[in-house]
Amino acid sequence: MHIQQRREFAFLILAGLFLGTMGMLNILGVTRFLYLGSIGSIPLIVAVGALPYPLTFLCTDLISEIWGESKAGQLVWIGFIVNCWIILILWLGGISPGLDGFSGFQGLPLADTTSPMPTFYEIRRLAFGSAGASMVAYLTAQFIDVRLFHYWKNLTKGEALWLRNNGSTLISQLVDTTAVVLISHFTAHILPIDVDQPLLPQLGTYIWSGYLFKGLIALADTIPFILMTGWLRCWLEVPGIGAEIPTDDLSIVET
């Protein structure tokens, strides 16, 4: 395989994993919350949509490292457009008449109100409820991740892969988790909150649980990130510490 074909193929794989995961998040989102045990007296509760989410940061870190900040930023914006496209299709699917006898506006049935709601409408309601939170958190966290990644890359002159991988991801994940939980609750009220219990400790549990899960995954992917970076540099013929594939030709530039 020609070197340019390798580079295009590798980028498409990483971009496909990133975009596919982001699309899946909008559908799965908060449709189910998982109990993954507890740490001390604090339960570890994670939305099912958060399970594959740390993979997106690994993909953007690899693209940032090999292709540069510009390519990673472009991918983040494309991911945002994909999310908007999914929301549009969910909206159109809800307002159009269906064979089940339902047609709705904002997810509410206009036909037979005594029949059970189709599963689609419940998924749509939850997706719409978390869409605003996920969009804001996604753009903020991903751009923070890309910017911090390159800040530390320039600061260390291309050294310390572990620092820019973990530092950028751990900070951006905290921003993402906090934004998702707070916006989801105060704007859409879709979190399973016990109204008989104090609110802030419950929100704190969701933030802590989500961030702990994402943080542990981020730390666990440090070695895979370093190994994959080394392998990609070799396979894609990108030699030198801090070297990146330019977007306009096949030459190598040093950062």
Image (tube, helix red, strand yellow):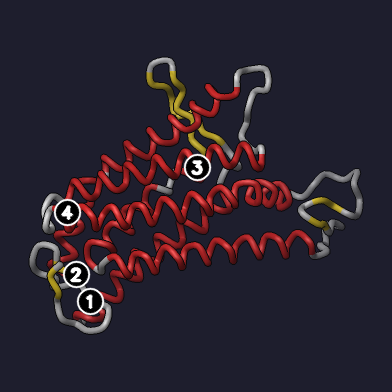
**Cα distance, mark 1 to mark 4?**
22 Å
Residue ID at (26%, 80%) = 5
- Tally the marks: 4
* 4 vs 2, front mark: 2
The disc placed on residue 244 is 2
Q: Amino acid at mark 4?
A: Leu
In this rendering, the answer to whether 24 lies above or below 122 is below
Q: Tell whether label 1 touches label 2 (CB within 8 Å).
A: yes
Q: Amino acid at mark 2?
A: Glu
Q: Pick whichever of labels 1 and 3 is earlier in the sequence.
A: 3
Q: Which residue is mark 3?
A: 179
Residue 211 % position (x, y):
40, 36
Residue ID at (46%, 68%) = 78
**Cα distance, mark 4 to mark 2?**
17 Å
Q: Which residue is mark 1?
A: 246
Q: Is residue 78 left or right of residue 230?
A: right
Residue 229 position by quadrant: bottom left
Task: Name the quadrant of the N terminus.
Answer: bottom left
In this rendering, the answer to whether 182 lies above or below 90 is above
Q: Is residue 19 left or right of residue 224?
A: right
Near-viewer residue (178 or 233): 178
Q: Which residue is mark 4?
A: 227
Q: Does dot 3 land on a helix, a strand or a loop? A: helix
**Cα distance, mark 1 to mark 3?**
34 Å
Residue 239 % position (x, y):
9, 69
Q: Does dot 2 land on a helix, a strand or a loop? A: strand
Q: Amino acid at mark 1?
A: Pro
Q: Amino acid at mark 3?
A: Ala
Q: Pick whichever of labels 3 and 2 is earlier in the sequence.
A: 3
Residue 24 % position (x, y):
52, 55
Q: Tell whether label 4 touches label 3 (CB within 8 Å).
A: no
